[in-house]
Image (cartoon, rainbow, N blue to C red):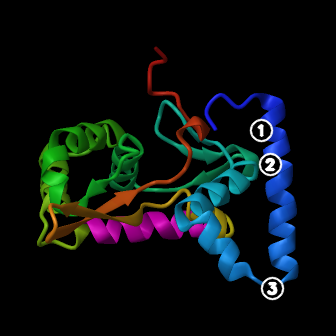
Amino acid sequence: MAGLGEHDAEVLAEEIRLRVKELRQLGRNDLLLHAIGVPVLEDLRIEAARGHLSPLHITRDYRFFLTLYNNKEIELSPVHKAVYLLFLNHPEGIEFKRLKEYRRELLGLYKETSRWMNLEKVEETVERLINPFDNAINEKCSRIKKAFDDAMDEYSATYYIISSHTTRHVAGSSRVWFERLKVITLPRELVVNDNVQKV
């Protein structure tokens, strides 16, 4: 299939469309799902939503605006903004239990978003956020979720919030472990951050 031209791809897409239609007429969505596979289905869901998702504009003073929603502001406190920016910076995801590895970055972001705050308080808050035995990070993520849920429909909000993504890893034949990542699935080309220098 390598080296398909644009015309060949269009012919193939038309053939798939007809086959999908036939399976649906037979009432065999189960076979259709099996043929497509869940990862492809998720990619298609993202592609379908992409046209309806609003760019997220982050201004120089760290205000968050949804440009397709009449520049609706997502109002978050400086600590919530710092947490959100950390996860935006890492589209690959971060495990909560590994947040200590991101301490310096999170501290820097919190200092930026809370310019007039007491440095001691900033550092104390960051220590709570990266402590795996403290619930602070979950509380912050819940508040961020509420802010986006209040601004848009639930389906669209799933792309903006910090959500769970579990990856199964297999090492050898018997060892299996799960990486429980937290990610923001918003396509990064929809993020306009005035604080990031263009290369």
Q: Which label is found at residue 17?
A: none
Give the residue pinned by disc 1: 9
Residue sitting at x 79%, y 56%: 16
Going by the numbered disc 2, the residue's amino acid type is: Ala
* Residue 26 percent across, percent down from the top left: 84, 83
Ranked by sequence position, the earlier of labels 3 and 1 is 1
In 3D space, how far apart are the residues under numbered discs 1 and 2 (Cα atoms)?
6 Å
Residue 154 in view of the camera: no
Report the Cα–Cα distance between label 3 and label 1. Answer: 27 Å
* Residue 15 lies within the magenta run: no
The secondary structure type at the circle numbered 1 is helix
Q: Which residue matches tag 2? A: 13
The residue wearing badge 3 is 27
Q: In the rendered structure, which segment of residues is drawn in magenta?
A: 137-151
Magenta residues: mostly which secondary structure?
Answer: helix
Q: Quadrant of the N terminus?
A: top right
